[in-house]
Structures are given as C-alpha cells and as structure tokens.
C-alpha cells in the first residue's frame, strides 16, 4: 500500500446550503480521491496533492446534504437558549456572568461577576450584538495570552493567532504556522481552553493525527484524554450564541 505523505493542512471556508462552513483541507501525496469527515472538530476534507481547490470544493458540494446533516447533529446537542434579558446568566471560562442592562452606550464591561451592558435601545438584537462584541474582545485577550504562555511552555515559537467565529470547530492550525481559535472557546473552563490550545500547538510539530501527534499532545497536556472527553460531552453548552 503506498504511503500517503502529508503535504499541507490548512483552514478554509465555503458556502453550503446558504451558510458558511469552516473546514480543514488536508493534502497528501499518493491520495487518489476526496475524503470527508465530520466530528467534534468540524469538517475535514482530505484530497490529492494535484487536485485543484475548485474541484475539491465541487466534490464537497456533491455531499452537501450529508455534510450539513452531520454538522447539525454535532450542533444540536441540547444547545441552551439564551434569554437576552436582565439577570440572564452567560457562560464565561467555566463560570457564569450575570447580565445587567441599562440604556446608553453602546458599551459592555465585566465587573464583580456581572456583564454590564449599555445599549441605546433595550431590544434583544442590540443586546446580543453588544454582548458578542464584548466576548470577542475579551476572548482575543485571554486566548492570546494562553496561546503565548503555552507556546513558551512547549518550547515553540509562538504562532500567529487569529480569532474566529467558528461554531463547529474550536481551533485549527495550518502549514503557515497560524492557529485559529473561536471566541466561543472562552466560555469553557480554563483547563478545556488549554487542552484545545495544546492540541493545536501539537500540530506545529505533527500536522496529522498520528500516534506521534497524540504523544505530543500528551507531552504538553498530560490529562488530555479526560479533558478531550469532557469537551466532547459539554461542548454544546458553549455554542448557545
């Protein structure tokens, strides 16, 4: 059986069924066809080295219904419904923030376990926009600091950090040494955040999911098996908005 040598592993996005779908494109020498996999990390597309990007995406679109069905299954695990009202509880780093509302702003800030939001009109759409904008700012700061700290701990040159809005993928790493982390990850407990970051950092040394890759994950995050299972069981809690 020929060896399929990994050439690249890059993050992309495409439109399927009227929605944006993030995916990782894996290129291998010796591969003949296109393979699709949807799991807790999102959509992974494996393709031959010589196949054009347009042809790869055309083949993915041929399986559009299957891909969207599988992604929906991962998203549908009892996702909580958020009520954008005074006193609502929002997840943050494994704990909760109490939503406090006032007219003014727009502005949002965290203080004493509360997320204090000011908007010109107290309608749900405006409140949600202000909350999400705060989450993105706060997540960029927190995730960026953890990525830097864990890079140093792993004796790696810190990669470029990109904040994403992915729903089905917590993080990704490409051959350009670029790590993407979704802002929604900052809703999870710190240990789960660190596991995801260590998982992506391990790809800087092993751009695959081989035994060597998982050994590198374990080197950086010795308790990764328990944390991975915990994330798999609770990830729907962090996709509410």
Image (tube, rainbow, N blue to C red):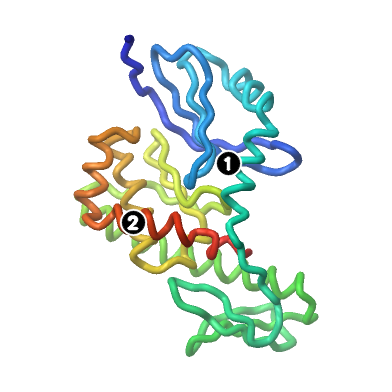
Residue lying at the far top of the rendered structure: 1
- The residue located at (62%, 26%) in the rendering is 60
Residue 201 in the figure: left or right of residue 70: left
Which residue is nearer to you in this view: 221 or 204?
221
At which x and y percent is residue 149?
28, 60
Secondary structure beneath dot 2 equals: helix
At which x and y percent is residue 140?
47, 62
Residue 152 in view (yes/no) = no
- The residue located at (58%, 80%) in the rendering is 89
At which x and y percent is residue 111?
50, 87
Residue assigned mark 2: 195
Residue 193 position by quadrant: bottom left
Quadrant location, the C terminus: bottom right
Disc 2 to disc 1, how far (Cα)? 21 Å
Q: Which mark is residue 155?
A: none
Residue 125 in view (yes/no) = yes
Residue 105 position by quadrant: bottom right
Labels in figure, total: 2
Which residue is nearer to you in this view: 136 or 66?
66
Secondary structure beneath dot 1 equals: strand
Quadrant location, the N terminus: top left
- The residue located at (67%, 43%) in the rendering is 20
At which x and y percent is residue 225?
30, 53
Residue assigned mark 1: 22
- The residue located at (46%, 34%) in the rendering is 10
Above or below for 56 versus 64: above
């Amino acid at each position: 059986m020929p060896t399929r040598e990994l050439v690249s592993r890059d993050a992309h996005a495409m439109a399927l069924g009227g929605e944006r779908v993030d995916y990782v494109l894996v290129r291998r020498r010796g591969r003949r066809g296109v393979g699709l996999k949807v799991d807790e990390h999102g959509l992974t597309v494996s393709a031959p080295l010589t196949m054009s990007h347009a042809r790869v995406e055309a083949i993915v679109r041929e399986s559009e219904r299957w891909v969207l069905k599988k992604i929906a299954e991962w998203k549908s695990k009892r996702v909580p419904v958020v009520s954008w009202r005074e006193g609502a509880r929002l997840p943050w780093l494994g704990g909760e923030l109490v939503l406090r509302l006032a007219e003014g702003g727009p502005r949002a800030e965290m203080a004493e376990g509360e997320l204090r939001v000011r908007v010109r009109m107290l309608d749900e759409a405006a409140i949600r926009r202000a909350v999400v904008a705060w989450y993105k700012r706060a997540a960029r700061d927190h995730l960026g600091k953890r990525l830097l700290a864990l890079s140093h701990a792993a004796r790696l040159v810190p990669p470029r950090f990109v904040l994403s809005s992915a729903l089905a993928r917590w993080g990704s790493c490409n051959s350009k040494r670029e790590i993407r982390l979704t802002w929604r990850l900052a809703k999870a407990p710190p240990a789960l955040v660190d596991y995801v970051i260590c998982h992506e950092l391990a790809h800087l040394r092993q751009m695959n999911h081989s035994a060597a890759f998982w050994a590198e994950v374990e080197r950086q995050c010795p308790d990764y098996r328990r944390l991975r299972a915990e994330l798999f069981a609770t990830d729907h809690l962090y996709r509410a908005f």
